[in-house]
Amino acid sequence: MKHVAIVGGGVIGLSAALECARRGHRVTVIERAPARRGASLGNAGMIVPSHFVPLAAPGMIGLGLKWMWNPESPFYIQPRLDWDLLAWAIRFWRASTPERVQRVAPLLRDLHLASRELYARLAEEEDFGLVKKGLLMLCKTERALEEEARTAAKAQTLDIPAKVLDAPQTAARDPSVTMDIAGAVYFEKDCHLDPARYVATLERRLRATGAELLYDGNVIGWRREGDRFVAARTTRGEIAADEFILAGGAWSPELGLRLPMQAGKGYSVTLPEPIEQPQLCSIFTEARIAVTPMGNALRFGGTMEIAGTNERINPRRVEGILRAVPHYFPHFRREHFAGLQPWCGLRPCSPDGLPYLGRTRAATNLVVATGHAMMGLSLAPITGELVGQLVDREPPRFDLGLLDVDRYA
């Protein structure tokens, strides 16, 4: 049995911790934030095999340049003189090629589908709100529907079921909400869940194994002996371990590794009693807004704001989300959201849109699992399984070459 210390108590860190505990290791989770906070709790809660295209994709640079001067746009880069941001943007541009997207799509498909299988297996034992009804990519315009139809065709070549629907067919698929759209693409394998309930499930299961969960304990460095880390230096003192897992999300680069990363701030607002309650999760395609039913509530989330690791809420970003809702769901009004407290969280975004997952030359007993961008919750269970295999020096279930931790080192 090893003592495994996990730096980061978000959905990736907790999933890795539970897998290590399941394998018989003693586990300590160190999380910088207080309990029940962090980027995992207020997200859209989607499991998305349909998302086989990484963030760094053809056309994203053009959209970013188009939107970057509009603080209410779906993708906003706060203009600032920052060498790390410039270097990240150049790498993002180099990675945004059709050839590279074609190369990584099968791996992303396999990882998402494996995660979906693990979620379904856990849902047989625990209720964390998993709903397997699919996802609708709702298109306001015919042009967007044509673009999504091309994505659907690519999905079908990867054996991901996808159907192009006109407006009446979409309404028949989810008649519980009124929509003003040109049509949609339906991905039947996608699912959704309540992320807060899922995180609570992981925490409860971890505590049942005897794992130690240390919240409000920021890791500020390492104590090294030779080519190994022997302890994590934290604001609560040193924590020694045999193996370390770095799952610190957007703050991972602060711990001395060369992990090019930008924090992509996302926002959400949750309506406790919506005027209509859809049964399927959906994405407003042009507005880049995710919509997720969570029990009796309805969550609207989105935007990608590259503005550093601050967690301040920008009211203009929230306003961009709320303005878009009535364009797709016409029975919803801006005043329905009055008085609601918005949430924000920081997604860890690598330059090529892929996670950093694997061992690293920085230390022989360190596994890195971060950089999942908007796919963190969707890929959490399979990431946890792969981390467990790496900790036990087993061949990982998938070839992780494209996710090489040292690819920018």
Image (cartoon, grey):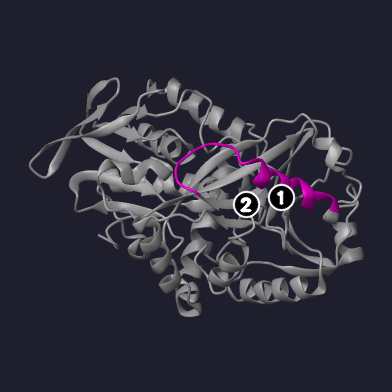
Q: Which mark is residue 303?
A: 2
The foreground one among 373 and 320 is 320
The residue lying at 70 percent from left, 38 percent from top is 269
Regarding mark 1 in the picture, which secondary structure is present there? helix
Identify the mark at residue 320; answer none if there is no mark.
Answer: 1
Nearest to the observer: residue 105 or residue 355: 355
136, above or below 220, in the image:
below
Q: Is residue 310 magenta?
A: yes
Q: Work out whether 145 lies above or below 171.
A: below
Name the residue at 43% across, 48% down: 383
Residue 291 appearing in the image: no
Q: Depth check: give the residue in front, 293 or 202.
A: 293
- Stretch of the chain drawn in magenta: 307-326
Residue 364 x, y percent position in the rendering: 17, 47
Cβ atoms at labels 2 and 1 below 8 Å apart? yes
Q: CA distance from mark 2 to mark 1?
A: 8 Å
Q: Earlier in the sequence, mark 2 or mark 1?
A: 2
Q: Amino acid at mark 1?
A: Gly
Q: Which mark is residue 81?
A: none
Kind of residue at disc 2: Thr
Total marks placed: 2
